[in-house]
Amino acid sequence: MPAPSLFGITNSNKNFAKREAWGKNQFNSTLPASLVCWLGKKGLPLKYLKLVAGSIAHDFIDSTIFLGMPYNSPDLRFEFECIYMPYQQFVFDRLPRIDLVTMDGHGCLKGIEIKLTALPDETTYDLPENQYGCEIVVRPDTIVYLALSIVSITSQAYLKKILSPFNKIQDWTDAETVLPHIKKMKDSLVAIMKDHENEQSPLILQPIWKTKSKSQVFADNAFDVFIWSNFATTQLFLFDQQSEKRVSRYERTLVWLIKMLLDYASNGRFNHKQIIDNITFNTKNDKAFATSGNRTQPLMDSPELLSPRIPKTDIKHIILGGGHNMLSPERRLDATILSNLDLFR
């Protein structure tokens, strides 16, 4: 009998024959990469959300462009929880790990964050099916890579000029000092993205898995993949809401991003760990923010969200060699797969 594996992931730093490769923080990244490969095999492009004239626009991107080379190339390697080394030059400290780095024999191709999401979420499961949405939880390291993706397509001189108003901030850790600058920070980020709209690039791989309401029964059309560009990702936290007394998680994310860009403009590098650890505004920084399904649904609304293109019956072609037997039933996706074992017959 063939060993447990995932479709398309032939060369990687994971040994799928071992149970630990199917653990929570493993399967959440490896399955999405396999879904990209499966869509590539079926000749289906990936749904691509990007920013056009300040608003989310829906497009498609070929899996070969997304991965950096064809999914079935013998030279393609998937490195999970790895550092995307081309960005190391822009930070003082060691880079955080990113969820997936694709590589060939010469080095890194792409660095991608992954957010595996359930459809619907807690805020939308009791709504009509065409209003289902996914909650997206973003970690601080994603914002570091967002900043780095912007740094890589701009220059110190450009950022120094556009961010010069924020040099007057004396204490970035004090909410009262920072709050009056929030709107201007947003305007500056919008200006940066407008000037570099044609240079945006994929940052987040967001697969969706759809169930019938909140049950453990897969929808007939169960899986698909959405790609968020680095600029589109900003729409998850750039809301028009501001308090005169406190900095929200969304606004703190914007402050982190602007401070990273400003420090790069001044020094050619920034200290991401110091920025995230020090600028907390008395809120835990274990995550940057979470955006609920009723907010993401209007951004993702599309035929692919309503009816994902990978049927549930394809799961047996994606999880191979009895890999489903390695899953942990206390986790929601794993439990749903294990509640639908007839799909593997």
Image: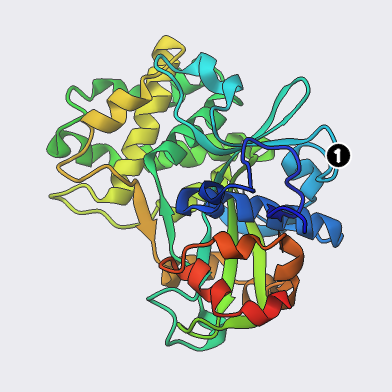
At label 1, which amino acid type do we have?
Answer: Ser
Between residue 317 and residue 70, name the one nearer to us: 317
Residue 117 visible in rendering: yes
Q: Which residue corresponds to the image point at 29% horizontal and 20% vertical from the top-left?
A: 167
**How is the model colour-coded?**
rainbow
Q: Which residue corresponds to the image point at 63% horizontal and 48% vertical from the top-left?
A: 16
Q: Quadrant of the N terminus?
A: bottom right
Q: Is residue 257 left or right of residue 197?
A: left
Q: Is residue 36 left or right of residue 87?
A: right
Q: Which residue corresponds to the image point at 47% horizontal and 84% vertical from the top-left?
A: 215
Q: Give the residue pinned by disc 1.
A: 73
SS type, badge 1: loop
Between residue 212 and residue 130, name the one nearer to us: 212
Q: Which residue corresponds to the image point at 73% horizontal and 46% vertical from the top-left?
A: 9
Look at the picture and state if 105 lies above or below 183: above
Q: Is residue 35 left or right of residue 152?
A: right
Residue 50 visible in rendering: no
